[in-house]
Amino acid sequence: MMPAMKTPIAIALHGGAGVLTRAKIDNSAEREYRTALQAALDLGWEMLCAGGSSLDAVEAVTRNLEDCPLFNAGRGSVYTSAGTHEMDASIMCGRKGQAGAVAAVSRIRNPVSLARLVMEQSGAVLLCGEGAEAFARECGIVPTASRYFHTDARREQLETARRMGRVSVDHDEMQEKYGTVGAAALDAAGNLAAATSTGGMTNKRPGRIGDSPVPGAGTFADNTTCAVSCTGEGEAFLRCCAAHEVSARMRHGGADLATAAEMVIHTVLPGKGGLVAVDRSGAVALPFNTEGMFRAWRSSSGTDGVAIYGEA
Ligand code: ASP
């Protein structure tokens, strides 16, 4: 039930976009995905209702999804062509305009939390690889053994991708499991925040970094406009600075959130994917140009849902 709110709050999250059709996901898998999305949504919503910050909420939601092996982030991340894991994540605070990110980390259980530490304690915006992991150790984060990130399903995806000689987004035709994760939220103090976390693309070249850890491409938040988290073909989101483009259309063009977000996904983006976004009035947008997107949203305006396929 929606509490009576003096000021709006809202949250939207995703678990990846792609070739998600009823024919591809059986009933029991669908139940598992819906349960995981609902749990993450409830977690973030409760934090916002209790007066928590949007920054804490998007971090907690993204951590929750990183811990779930169904999604391509944290545990359950896809494999590189070298049979390793290289994870990317970012977080952005719309109040201060600050961002933090990590790229190509292999031993970090919750990359989004390391991204937040980068934002708050490193003096940098983006740390990668060994340097990011050294910073994690300085912060007292114990490295996680690589077997934690292993899942049989992801290993099978790598073998298939290798056989086909392809690098594939997690929502490609040949994939059976999906799911970069992320969230955007508005808190009762009027602050917006967004976060995104991913294992990247199956069979990717070691060192390849997509949009997810790049502020402005995969993640963006600005209290004057919106908070955005993207998922899809990272190179396409990078090339058009997709998350920032949503904000820019609002800020400079006077577009509302829904129009800006739809335009970016359906006319600007030179590839496949989707995004979730929230604005400072509590409006939510969840456009995608793929068959489906794992998503969940709730706003004090009364909108509320968990969805996978192309239905509203
Ligand atoms: N955007 C991610 C990447 O390119 C993948 C995804 O969203 O599924 O690394």
Image (tube, rainbow, N blue to C red):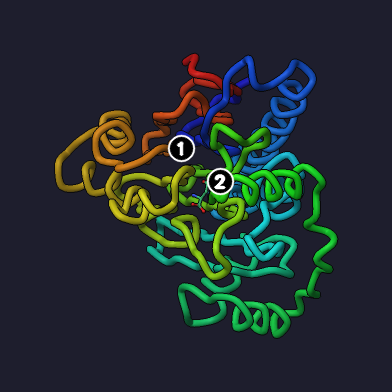
Point 51% across, 28% down: residue? 299
**Labels 2 & 1 near each other (Cβ < 8 A):** yes
Residue furthest to the left in view is 253
Give the secondary structure at mark 2: strand
Q: Position of residue 227 (x, y in %)?
A: 41, 46
Res. 52 in view = yes
Q: Which residue is mark 2?
A: 182
Label 2 environment density (alpha carbons within 10 Å; few <14, some 14–19, many ≥20): many
Q: Amino acid at mark 1?
A: Val
Q: Amino acid at mark 2?
A: Gly
Front residue (pair 55, 264): 264
* Numbered badge on residue 111: none
Q: Earlier in the sequence, mark 2 or mark 1?
A: 2
Q: Position of residue 45 (x, y in %)?
A: 62, 36
Point 68% across, 62% down: residue? 85
Left or right: 264 in relation to 274: left
Give the secondary structure at mark 1: strand
